[in-house]
Image: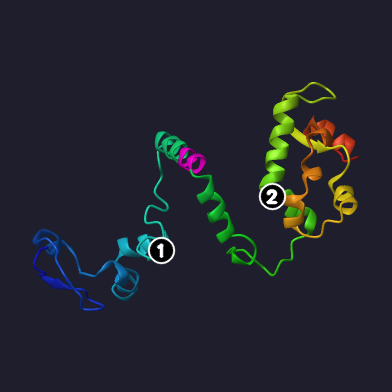
């Protein structure tokens, strides 16, 4: 470890900085005190960084920096690979942010219908229906495909006496593929008696 040659301007912690760095900067601070130091001794660059969320502990320091499409694809592939290889970690992570533990929790005021439609099981059901039919069963279109419940979801919730999203998640009849067909958006609007506008 190098011998400290300066101190943090906020907490006085001993730090080492290269002499060339010390010549360029207005002050020296440790990582934990960076946001306080930026606010106390601001300059133009620091204020821009603070606006973008950089320099605050627990915030992604790359926030606001554009990433190349190639790096986005590589990151996406690596994330998908990791979560497919560690399904137990995915479940564990999900439990940490479900219900009242989620940062957008607002006292459980979501309607049951909305809560069920936001479940991962519903997304898997929709994808399986579209993968099975591959086109609209009414007009044969392959554009803007949507999954449609033959027996409406509202009726199923009443029939199986479901009152919570957790009960819906565990009800196998709700995710029965025989109760779904694929429709294009136009046909789906017609089935529900809504006006479709291009």
Mark 1 residue crowding within 10 angstroms, few (<14) / some (14–19) / many (20+)? few
Mark 2 and mark 1 lie on one chain; the one further toward the N terminus is 1
Q: Which mark is residue 119?
A: 2
Q: x%, y% of residue 75?
A: 43, 40
14 sits left or right of 190 in the view: left
Whether residue 158 is visible here, answered yes or no, is yes
Contact (Cβ within 8 Å) of mark 2 with mark 1: no
In the rendered image, the quadrant that contains the N terminus is bottom left
Range drawn in magenta: 79-85
Q: Distance between the residues labelled 2 and 1?
A: 28 Å
- Give the quadrant of the C terminus: top right
In this orientation, does residue 144 appear?
A: no
Q: Residue at coordinates 53% horizontally, 49% vertically from top-left?
A: 88
- Give coordinates of residue 185: x percent, y percent: 78, 34
Q: Main secondary structure of the magenta part?
A: helix
Q: Position of residue 45 (x, y in %)?
A: 31, 61
Q: Which of the 4 image quadrants contains residue 182?
A: top right
Q: Does the magenta stretch include residue 83?
A: yes
On residue 93, which mark appears?
none
Way the structure is coloured: rainbow
- Relative to 65, is 109 above or below? below
- Badge 1 is on which residue? 58
Towards the viewer: 25 or 171: 171
């Amino acid at each position: 470890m190098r011998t400290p040659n300066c101190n943090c301007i906020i907490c006085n912690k001993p730090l080492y900085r290269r002499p060339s760095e010390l010549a360029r900067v207005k002050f020296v601070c440790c990582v934990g005190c960076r946001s306080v130091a930026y606010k106390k001794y601001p300059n133009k660059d620091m204020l821009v960084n603070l606006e973008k969320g950089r320099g605050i502990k627990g915030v992604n320091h790359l926030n606001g920096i554009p990433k190349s499409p190639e790096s986005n694809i590589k990151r996406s592939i690596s994330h998908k690979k990791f979560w497919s290889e560690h399904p137990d970690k995915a479940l564990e992570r999900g439990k940490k942010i479900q219900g009242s533990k989620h940062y957008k929790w607002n006292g459980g005021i979501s309607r049951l219908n909305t809560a069920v439609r936001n479940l991962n099981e519903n997304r898997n059901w929709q994808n399986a229906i579209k993968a099975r039919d591959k086109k609209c069963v009414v007009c044969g279109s392959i554009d803007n495909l949507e999954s449609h419940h033959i027996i409406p979801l509202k009726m199923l919730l009443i029939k199986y006496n479901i009152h919570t999203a957790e009960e819906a998640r565990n009800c196998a009849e709700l995710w029965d593929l025989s109760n779904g067909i694929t429709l294009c958006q136009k046909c789906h609007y017609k089935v529900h008696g809504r006006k479709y506008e291009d």
